[in-house]
Image (cartoon, rainbow, N blue to C red):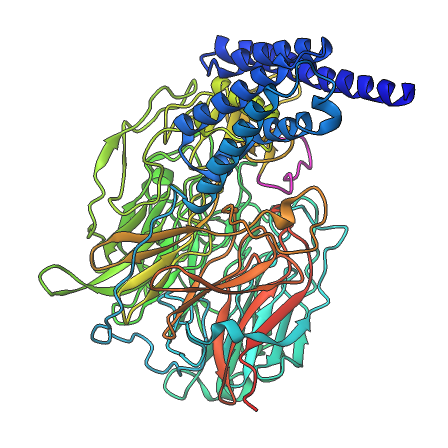
Amino acid sequence: MESKKQQSRATLLLSALFALLTGLYLLVGGIWLAAVGGSWYYPIAGVVMLMVAGQLYRKRAAALWLYAALLLCTMLWGIAEVGFDFWALAPRCDVLVLFGIWLLLPFVWRRLTPSRPAVPSLLVSLLISAAMLIWAGFNDPQEINGTLPTDTVAPARDAAPQVADGDWPAYGRTQEGQRYSPLRQINADNVHKLKEAWVFRTGDLRLPSDPGEITNEVTPIKVGDTLYLCTAHQRLFALDAASGKEKWHFDPALKTDPSFQHVTCRGVSYHEANAQNAAPEVLADCPRRILLPVNDGRLFALNADNGKPCETFANKGVLNLQTNMPVTTPGMYEPTSPPVVTGTTIVIAGAVTDNFSTREPSGVIRGFDVNSGKLLWVFDPGAKDPNAIPADEHHFTPNSPNSWAPAAYDAKLDLVYLPMGVSTPDIWGGHRTPEQERYASSVLALNATTGKLAWSWQTVHHDLWDMDLPSQPTLADITDKDGNTVPVIYAPAKTGNLFVLDRRNGQPVVPAPERPVPQGAAKGDWLSPTQPFSALSFRPQKKLTGADMWGATMYDQLVCRIIFQGLRYEGTFTPPSEQGTLVFPGNLGMFEWGGISVAPNRQIAIANPMALPFVSKLIPRGPGNPMQPPKDAKGSGAETGIQPQYGVPYGVKLNPFLSPFGLPCKQPAWGYISGIDLKRHQIVWKKRIGTPRDSMPFPVPFPVPFNMGMPMLGGPITTAGNVLFIGATADNYIRAYNITNGEKLWQARLPAGGQATPMTYEANGKQYVVIAAGGHGSFGTKMGDYIVAYALPDEK
């Protein structure tokens, strides 16, 4: 008996100690938060918890009354801040609810006096809190519920009539970048029956010499009976489309280094020569070829039938893209996306190392003869004369704005549309020339045959946030309010804006007026007083506040609120600062390289925007932070962390805005899937996508039923079967949704991260859906080497 009394006493002391420590934490942290302009809830809650601790120590049931009042008031305060949003409410009350349940256990409350009258009050408070959370779980204020039009329109002009319905011969299926397939064998009624058809393993896994930013982002292409795909180290595989069995492979022998900012391959390009555009020796050598970009600055042309280098192309099948570059260090210039291929020309650009120095490779765009590899034209965005081809003793302009994402092509207009980045270093621009500013963060339209400028349209002026155009533009023909067909280009931007331009002349079709933005640049820099804001956008409609801060518990949420109050933040386009600036939308962008998908038969689109803030902090030059790079200095191998920015007055520290526990400080959702009516340019539905299953600190062996809305890298595809497919999320799944209303129809567990855009095709009368499941190093998903195909089971 005495032992039970001692255990009960120990239980009360432990309970009192928990309440004491929590109360002290909330009081001290809350006073700090209130002193910097934040909410007064936390110090008040801290005082109440200290009172609860005192009453527990004295064995008084008043502890339960106090605690019931605190829990109920916390729920009401949370609803006042964020409404009935489950994921926003949960961290405000999770610890309190669990401790409340603990206090209701008989071996706790029976030791309190007088106990029985106080127990119902706490029970009622817990039940009310549970009811509020359940209600919030079924009523998501962030969702938009609507229905996209189902009527079809007259067929749009087909820029690539030679594409068979069952093929996927380019990165976006066609070079218009629509990521749409006319196949309908798999449809909204039967997609739930999809089963794994085959799995191919490339054997290409992470190496000790790789940087953190090693990624598996490939979208395979399919021509005839063969799939072609590249791996992270740019090994090229040809697979039988029906069985997934290897036909041949080619290894370019890429030698990586931890200083590479990227080790990735998003895809390859295909070209088929004919007697009208190719010499007999070309037809004999390589009539069908695959063009493979390699991260060390090479472009291979390989026979599509056997994988052998095309002897008649460049230097026996290898084109050196480092020629005339001002810097030729491997890994500083990286073509990571498949080039555009016309009947005569290969148009290729590439990534450069962000934020390293003011002397890096050029972002020059070049056109090469598709058969011989001969240089036909250049467009160097940072040069006074962009089309000037340098002689052997001259080089392209260092740090010209680059275009690292896939481009799009209009065969009828013979225009190639390039999504442009910014002159590096990205986060300080006082040194930039007018030429470096002119085409930065723009949609650039060039004549694909000559390289001459057709038009350009800038989406961010004097970009100091790395808010470039990160994905392949999408071309479509839409019907305006007067019934006229307008050829447009959709340009998704990191800012969340979806710019809609007439692709003939670059004039906005959807208004994008200039609006004032925050001012106050760092010393020596300057800012544009205005920026363009598209009327079609997923950008935040209001500034973040302390109420938007998040955490797994009230403890780290309090820390996030304190950090938030200490950052400079005045809304979108708050300039970089030594204080530290909250960048939202973040450097990762609301749109990334996955782009959007357009179903031209219905004039609708699917997008998957993100909402993850970053923090950038300028680091003035001084001891340990020299202006010029030390001898043999190399890149950091990452796009986050300390970035040197040699040659300008500041380095910079770039990171996602995370709590001490490594979770985002902004409340969910961080990722959505959404449907857009292109006739009205209106967002019709928007849903969270992704669960925290693979982001937990411990393995979760079962599906998590809660859609939190996870960050993602990769894009959607759509089909005539009224189904959209997407992987991309930070949990390892591929999912299918009803295009019309966003209803989830199917999902399958992937063996590794699916940070890639899927594709679909037909082989031997069967439709397949294929995705690369290889993970993403810096994104933190499970790495692997899988290519996974799904199909409907054979009818018995």
Q: Is residue 613 at least partly visible in the picture?
A: no
Would you say residue 113 sits in the magenta stretch?
no
Q: Position of residue 752 (x, y in %)?
A: 66, 59
Q: Quadrant of residue 459?
A: top left
Q: Where is residue 139 in the image (x, y as percent from the top left)?
A: 41, 44
**Measured along the vertical axis of the image, is residue 49 above or below residue 298?**
above
**Measured along the vertical axis of the image, is residue 364 above or below residue 568?**
below
Q: Position of residue 287 (x, y in %)?
A: 50, 85
Q: Which residue is drawn at 60% across and 17% down?
A: 622
Q: Residue at x 59, y 30 (%)?
A: 97
**Measured along the vertical axis of the image, is residue 513 above or below residue 750?**
above
Instruction: Compare residues 22 and 340 and report the one nearer the observer.
Output: 22
**Measured along the vertical axis of the image, is residue 656 above or below residue 189?**
above
Overall secondary structure of the magenta stretch?
Answer: loop
The N terminus sits in image quarter: top right
Q: Position of residue 161 (x, y in %)?
A: 32, 81
Q: Which residue is drawn at 48% across and 18% down?
A: 565
Q: Is residue 468 at least partly visible in the picture?
A: yes
Q: Quadrant of residue 755?
A: bottom right
The segment highlighted magenta reads 628-639
Q: Quadrant of residue 778?
A: top right
Would you say residue 632 sits in the magenta stretch?
yes
